[in-house]
Amino acid sequence: MDINLKAIGEVRSCFKEKFGIPRQPNLVKDAPGKLVLYPAYARQEAVRFLEGFSHVWILFLFHKTGEGTPENWSPGHWSPMVRPPRLGGNKKVGVFASRSPFRPNPIGMSCVALESVELSETGPVLHLSGVDILDRTPVLDIKPYVPYSDALPEARDGFADGPPKPGLTVIFSQKAAAQIRDREGDIPALEAVIRGVLENDPRPAYTGNTAPERVYGIRLYDMDVKWQVTDTQVTVISAERV
């Protein structure tokens, strides 16, 4: 059966590359984003009463795991077994027991906070927080989060036993701290976002993380953030505007 889906909009987020994106929504609660609807769907009546919900489900396309553009996209590689980061990146589980993006149909879902609904001149814009979605990700659907149905306290969480605990302490060099202060007027909660991303250790678990002299980098907003790790401490070296 052929199924044709159309993107209804896209997420604009602070995450400009895949490396460093939180591995689940709301791990970095200050991480902002906004959902902009494409013109064919940018109608105010389509979001009427949505502002009454505190959270929404975003169904989206893992468009960087396949080929082509969001308008002309085709699935790429998928595997029946994957290595989830929660198991150290060395133990395999079935792809359907994971949230890996490398799926037969690479559809993602995130439950994120809905901060506000802006009725702009070009259509509704949803302002979000706690996002774990790459910038310019195409969105397939939006659904309200309904606590009495969606929150199931008795549910079992398999190998993902509770939320991950931040494993690293983050400090900022004088240079990085000054650079961040210079930008926080334009980018609220910039330091909190950087801290939240790095506390959760975005490095691939399977590498062993044994190179304290290595300098890592990540693109956040329009900044290139550089850091090093020694034992359980991250030192942010710089946060240059690019």
Image (tube, rainbow, N blue to C red):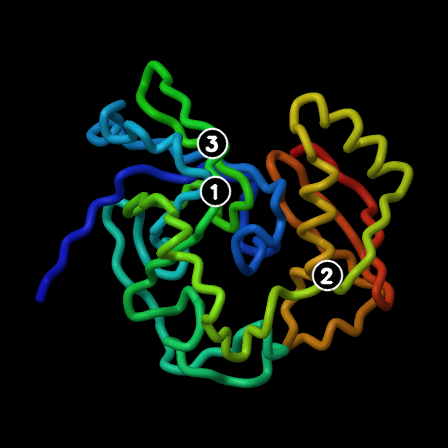
The residue wearing badge 1 is: 135
Instruction: Name the foreground residue: 29 vs 202.
Output: 29
Q: Name the element at disc 2.
A: loop
Instruction: Say which amino acid is labelled 1.
Output: Asp
In space, the residues marked 3 and 2 are separated at their CA atoms by: 26 Å
> Which residue in the rendered view is the most extreme toward the top?
121
> Residue 230 bears which disc, if any?
none
> Residue 127 bears which disc, if any?
3
Which image quarter is the N terminus in? bottom left
Q: Is residue 110 rendered to the left or right of residue 106?
A: right
In space, the residues marked 3 and 1 are separated at their CA atoms by: 14 Å
Instruction: Name the foreground residue: 160 vs 101.
Output: 160
- Number of other residues with Cα within 10 Å of mark 1, as a class: few under 14, some 14 to 19, many 20 or more: some
Cβ atoms at labels 3 and 2 below 8 Å apart: no
Instruction: Say which amino acid is labelled 2.
Output: Pro
Dot placed on the residue nearer the N-terminal end, 3 or 2 = 3
User: Of the residues tagged 1 and 2, which is closer to the observer?
Assistant: 2
Residue 84, image x and y in percent?
53, 74
Dot placed on the residue nearer the N-terminal end, 1 or 2 = 1
Q: Name the element at disc 3.
A: strand
Q: Is residue 178 above or below residue 219?
A: above
Q: Is residue 185 rendered to the left or right of residue 1?
A: right
The picture quadrant where one finds residue 48 is top left
Q: Is residue 80 above or below residue 205?
A: below
Q: Name the element at disc 1.
A: loop
Which image quarter is the C terminus in? top right
Dot placed on the residue nearer the N-terminal end, 3 or 1 = 3
What residue lies at 28% left-to-right and 47% top-to-bottom? Answer: 140
Residue 25, image x and y in percent?
52, 53
Instruction: Name the foreground residue: 17 vs 197.
Output: 197
What residue lies at 66% left-to-right and 23% top-to-bottom? Answer: 186
The residue wearing badge 2 is: 166
